[in-house]
Image (cartoon, grey):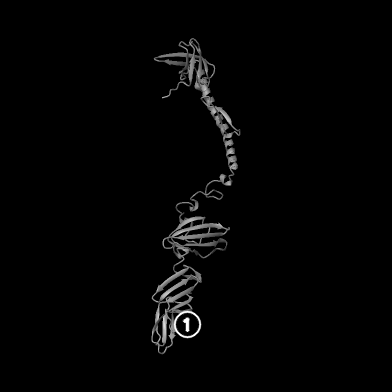
Amino acid sequence: MAGVWYRAGTIAMTSGSKKVTGTGTSWANAQNGIAKGTALVLASGASVDVYEIDRVESNTVLYLVDNYRGTNATGKTYAIDTTRTDSIPEFARRLAATLSYHQQNLDVLQQLYTSTAASITFTAPDGTEITAIPWKKLEQQAARSLEDMGAGTAAKRNVGTAAGNLMEVGAFGLGARAPLSDAAFSASDFNQFNVPSGRYTTSGVWLHGPFGDSGHTGIVEVLDRIFTNQTVQTFYGQFGSRSKYSRYGDESKNYWDRWRMEYDQGNIIGPVSQSNGMPTGAIIERGSNSNGEYVKYADGTLFCKSVELSIDLSVAGPKNVTVPMPHVSTSPATQFTSPVSLYPGVDNFSDVISSANGSYFNIRFPNIDGLSVVRGFYIAAIGRWY
């Protein structure tokens, strides 16, 4: 455990002399309390010699009251008892030294905080001189360094969510592992302006969504105040409705555009649908049933091909052919195809269609005398499904 006596550095002494020379000592520093009447203690083996100090000349020279009785010595350890005060004046001297020391520290702090000089120099308690740069100078250098590095205005912006701030990761649900809750919306209604830009979760029944007033479980991205009054919403469905839908709204007109589905490899093929002539489903729908195969397109085009049919060419009469998917037109374009010729040397028999509606064709074949054979054929029809 360190003592409270002064032991800094080492000393050199000459036998018969009162002078003591120190190395690494600060005897003249009043804060250390070394003065006339204090005791210099020298230990040598089991013996201890005590000398009274007469005066302190400098940080490295002091004088004793009596001559040194030992042999010449250098690099010698020592101790000075500074714990005793033998008079009120001595106590006052030490108190004044302590107050002066603290005042010096306060002066140094004030210079560090307020000085505009390039640097300031002060002396540490152990006598070391220290040169430091004041805070104001550091601020100036930091600002100049940013300019020298070509830093723009962002280097001086605060981080936060207010206007003009730098946005941190996670603000408004952007860059975070999870989006924000839907608290920014009220009553679970997509038709709302003034919702801050960001990503929000949705669940349960929502109004005015891509699926109408029904369940919408997913994430909605909001870009608010695009071109002053416009807002863009993008909805990402989950589970069975993973399609992406987008729309924009204009607050100045209190107007919301319809939702538009974005197509990708996951929703190009599927059930086609429409509303008022506007596609609302997939682009291509392909299917088949007992009547044949069909392909429906989002623009309303419908292509049907019947199963292979047979007709006895020796028997004249009508034959109804049901198409696999109804047409809205009563006279779709049709074409006969057959594995072999129905009549020898003739393949085109479009003139045998007697009548048609959206669900079937009525075909009438003439009797061919002397030809009793069953032939197979197909019917292909192109029309519209709406």
Q: Residue at x 48, y 21 (%)?
A: 9
- Is 269 rendered above or below residue 11? below
Label 1: which residue? 350
Query: Secondary structure beneath disc 1?
Result: helix
Q: Dot 1, crowdedness within 10 Å: few (<14), some or many (≥20)?
A: few
Which residue extends farthest top?
Answer: 16
Can you give x and y, in whole percent of width and height, for residue 88 in the image? 50, 18
Answer yes or no: is residue 353 visible: no
Viewer-closest of 247 and 29: 247
Viewer-closest of 61 and 323: 323
Q: The N terminus appears in which quarter of the rendering?
A: top left
Which residue extends farthest front?
Answer: 345
Q: Residue at x 46, y 72 (%)?
A: 296
Viewer-closest of 283 and 374: 374
Which residue extends farthest right?
Answer: 117
- Is 161 rendered above or below residue 64? below
Viewer-closest of 24 and 299: 299
Q: Amino acid at mark 1?
A: Ser
